[in-house]
Image: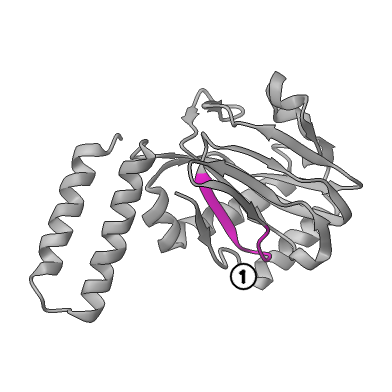
Amino acid sequence: MLLHVPELLSPEQVSRARALLDRADWIDGRATAGPQSGRAKHNMQVRENTPTAQELGDMVVKALERNALFITAALPSRVFPPLFNRYRDGESFGTHVDNAIRQIPGTPIRLRTDLSATLFLNDPEEYEGGELVIEDLFGVHRVKLPSGHLILYPANSLHHVTPVTRGTRLASFFWIQSMVKDDAERTLLFDLDIATQQVGRNLPDHPVGVQLTNIYHNLLRRWAEL
């Protein structure tokens, strides 16, 4: 499932993030890439475990925790601490697939990357190029969202970022381990949850709402891994 989560961050939060990124400690983006993707990755990244990275990451994680659409779609078990990158002057990231397992720096905790997420931190008109291109069974999807908006997609998808030929592209990226690791099962639960909510709004006293909720939770009980 490919999902657009609008306005994850408010304009005020985006402004704060941009101010922090203006004075961030930037390093070669290949610092967090594997051997194969490192050959395709040409960008800069905020150094991990700095006060700037910590404040920015906390802002994003708290916004995720408050966002009902994200929670419904991702059913998150763990979220990798958000990273932040910058593309300009022709920088790009060639076609690659994200690592299946990532270790959270400074901890023994490993995370299975069921979902990938990109949070855009500046508007499309501020730069040319820089599209996130995601390939799946239904074709090729080109994504370039307004600032504060997030795209969520299966981490097993091949994807790339096209060269930025004018301006600067700023974004956060991270991975999510879901309680339901299978994308098809997770998509069914998402569709069922959205339908149940619609029934609750349109027919608040109809018993079918309880029946749908029962089906949802029994499927979640069957498929979830804690």
Coloration of the structure image: one colour
Quarter of the picture containing the C terminus is top left
Query: Which residue is more in the foreground, 175 or 188?
Result: 188
**Would residue 135 appear left or right of 109 to someone viewing this image?**
right
Range drawn in magenta: 144-153
Asked if the magenta segment contains residue 219, the reply would be: no
- Name the residue located 60 percent from the left edge and 44 percent from the top edge: 134
What residue does disc 1 label?
A: 10
Name, please, the residue furthest toward the top. Answer: 35
- Name the residue located 19 percent from the left edge and 45 percent from the top edge: 219
**Would residue 34 appear left or right of 198 to someone viewing this image?**
right
Q: Position of residue 154 (x, y in %)?
A: 49, 41
- Dominant SS type (magenta): loop
Q: Position of residue 147 (x, y in %)?
A: 68, 65
Q: Amino acid at mark 1?
A: Ser
- Name the residue located 31 percent from the left edge and 64 percent from the top edge: 194
**Residue 201 higher or lower than 194, as above or below:** below
- Residue 124 appears in the figure: yes
**Residue 127 higher or lower than 26, as above or below:** below
